[in-house]
Image (spheres, coloured by chain):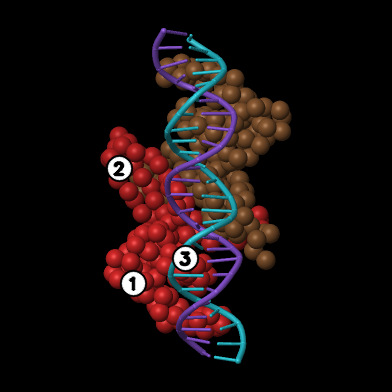
Chain colours: A red, B brown, C cyan, D purple
Amino acid sequence: MEKQKFREFLLTKGLKQTKEREEIINELMNTKGHFDPDELFLRLKNKGSKVSRASVYRTIPILIESGFIEQVEKTDRHAHYEKVSEKQHHDHMICTKCGKVIEFYSPTLEMLQEELCQKEGFKGIKHTLEILGHCKKCSQ
Amino acid sequence: MEKQKFREFLLTKGLKQTKEREEIINELMNTKGHFDPDELFLRLKNKGSKVSRASVYRTIPILIESGFIEQVEKTDRHAHYEKVSEKQHHDHMICTKCGKVIEFYSPTLEMLQEELCQKEGFKGIKHTLEILGHCKKCSQ
DNA sequence: TTCATTGCAAAAGCTTTGCATGTGT
DNA sequence: ACACATGCAAAGCTTTTGCAATGAA
């Protein structure tokens, strides 16, 4: 997603385009992988930005709603987010012997999950599927 | 897992078998589905137990290490756990708004995964599928 | 002008910890 | 007796919020 879309989002919601929000989204444009709010705040601070922690925290829900980032996981103590990426979703098979990771994608699987969600009245947004086992080489 | 195994675990680790740990594990034996530490504490309290919150929190890592429970997910604010059960495998839908957890099981899904594994020459042993999204109540 | 937004500091919510006391082994 | 456990209250961490001041539209 590009910055422009975020600006439009703000507009349609009657929200304002501020220096702080600009700084935050610019920082995220240069970010790869996961981040947590405090990390983001500190990176900005180190670059000389005056954005406050509060504003970072307050901006996150907006970024999520606009589809710019998504929550990945709550681990030990803090939430993690990542940019919604352009690259296609995929799942993982992980070999517990050699650590090999196979990425795969199955439209059938995706559809099936969608059906299962509907059955439960659940609106699926994101999923993670990890299959642990042994790869070809390790299973002989 | 039965209580007995937990007792053995304590023994081998040089830990002590206390009234509090007994009460906690008994409560968990009667528990179905997920729980969070505070919930567990309150249930015990309502039953007249004098176990403190601190002890509940301190016991959780031990229960995990012994394989009696496992962490399911950290959603909105608190961690969730569930008994490692003898019961059939299932997957989870987790509402990121209210934390509700729906357990589901789909033979079709299991079979499909089996097929996908075969295609990759992978021998699947165990898998985890978590679908994050919004439950019926939270999605309106 | 008007209302969203900001920074600050205080509050809140969950979890951990220090310490004196109690208790299994 | 010795080490581990417990309860309590205080501290820790992440996140949220009240409020007065600021700033975008």
Residue nearest the observer in this picture, A33 or A11:
A11
**Residue underneath mark 3:** A54
**Label 2 to label 3: alpha-carbon separation:** 40 Å
The residue lying at 43 percent from left, 64 percent from top is A53
The residue lying at 63 percent from left, 57 percent from top is B135
Residue nearest the observer in this picture, B121 or D14:
D14
Which corner quadrant holds the N terminus of chain B?
top right
Looking at the image, is A131 positioned above or below residue C23? below
Helix, strand, or loop for circle 1?
loop
**Label 2 to label 1: alpha-carbon separation:** 41 Å
- Chain ID, mark 2: A
The residue lying at 34 percent from left, 68 percent from top is A44
Question: Which is more foreground, mark 2 or mark 3?
Answer: 3
- Chain ID, mark 3: A
* Same chain check for tags 1 and 3: yes
Looking at the image, is B22 positioned above or below residue B99? above
**Label 1 to label 3: alpha-carbon separation:** 14 Å
Which corner quadrant holds the C terminus of chain B?
bottom right
Q: Is residue A117 visible in the rendered structure shown here?
A: no
**Residue underneath mark 2:** A99
**Residue underneath mark 1:** A49
Q: Could you tell me the amino acid type at mark 3? A: Ala
The residue lying at 42 percent from left, 82 percent from top is A4
